[in-house]
């Protein structure tokens, strides 16, 4: 199985701060990567697919980049509503696998 | 709009089975794979498997073969997942999902005597 390693496990950011979350795959996933945000008691919400394509309705402060085995999610200006847990997922090979999550809090 | 409406929470005894549903609306049910995902104790996510409603074809995470059975009822646009021989390790929230990015509200399964 492809292992997805996310870092950091948690972080806190101030309003307006730029936040970057990393995701490393154990093998090349050819941009077959998605990012999700999950808030307490809610289902995960898709933010980014294909490593860098913004899902409809997602604010433009979210962006994804990367290739090969290294990917990142950037929030250009932290907002209150961005608190939550962020997961990466590879969709290239079965079984699809997720990172362990990054908990983002407002400082 | 696309919606996936899942059945309610379940409390089941160890060794028993549970069957949960995922009713799809707002799109042609037979055109998209439906996946199932497990989330244990608010932690990370595990992909269980997927089913293609048009044919019934399935793909599974090896870890869940023998544990999960996926079926569909095309007449009601509903996907089902049955989990068998339940243990405390199966206590979790289970989601059905459809690309791109549509998720049901989740079913909390608690295995307890």
Image (spheres, rainbow, N blue to C red):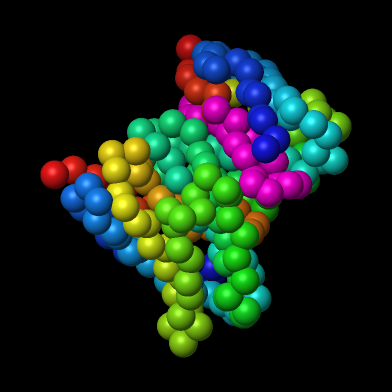
Q: How many marks?
A: 0
Residue A90 visible in the snapshot: yes
Q: Is residue A19 positioned above or below B103 on the image?
A: above
| Residue A46 rendering spot, x and y as whole percentages | 60, 46
- Relative to the observer, which residue lies in front, A26 or A19? A26
Residue at left 63%, top 50%? A57
- Relative to the observer, which residue lies in front, B61 or A84? B61
Q: Is residue A29 left or right of residue A1?
A: right
Residue at left 54%, top 28%? A101
Q: Is residue A104 positioned above or below B44 on the image?
A: above
Quarter of the C terminus of chain B within the rendering = top left
| Residue A94 rendering spot, x and y as whole percentages | 68, 49
Residue at left 58%, top 60%? B50
Q: Is residue B92 left or right of residue A16?
A: left
| Residue A2 rendering spot, x and y as whole percentages | 70, 35
- Residue A99: in magenta span: yes
Farthest residue in the bottom direction?
B75
Give residue B89's quadrant in the image: top left
Quarter of the N terminus of chain B within the rendering = bottom right
Give residue B60's quadrant in the image: bottom right
Residue A52 visible in the snapshot: no
Give residue A30's quadrant in the image: top right
Residue at left 52%, top 16%? A10
State which region is magenta. Answer: A80-100
- Residue A79: in magenta span: no
Q: Is residue B18 left or right of residue B70?
A: left
Q: Is residue B48 left or right of residue B106?
A: right
| Residue B11 rendering spot, x and y as whole percentages | 20, 51
Q: Is residue B87 positioned above or below B24 on the image?
A: above
């Amino acid at each position: 199985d492809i292992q997805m390693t996310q870092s950091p496990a948690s972080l806190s950011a101030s309003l307006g701060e730029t936040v970057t979350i990393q995701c490393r795959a154990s093998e090349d996933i050819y941009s077959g990567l998605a990012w999700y945000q999950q808030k307490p008691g809610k289902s995960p919400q898709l933010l980014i697919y294909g490593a860098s394509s913004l899902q409809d309705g997602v604010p433009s402060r979210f962006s994804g980049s990367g290739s090969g085995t290294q990917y990142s999610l950037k929030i250009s200006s932290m907002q209150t509503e961005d608190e939550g847990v962020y997961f990466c997922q590879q969709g290239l090979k079965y079984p699809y696998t997720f990172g362990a999550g990054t908990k983002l809090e407002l400082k | 709009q696309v919606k996936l409406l899942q059945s309610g929470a379940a409390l089941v005894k160890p060794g028993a089975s549970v069957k949960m549903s995922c009713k799809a609306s707002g799109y042609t049910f037979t055109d998209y794979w439906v996946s199932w995902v497990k989330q244990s104790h608010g932690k990370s996510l595990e992909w269980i498997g997927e089913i293609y409603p048009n044919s019934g074809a399935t793909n599974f995470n090896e870890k869940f073969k023998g544990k999960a059975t996926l079926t569909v009822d095309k007449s009601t646009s509903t996907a089902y997942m049955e989990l068998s021989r339940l243990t405390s390790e199966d206590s979790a929230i289970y989601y059905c999902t459809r690309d791109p990015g549509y998720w049901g509200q989740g079913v909390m399964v608690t295995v307890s005597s």
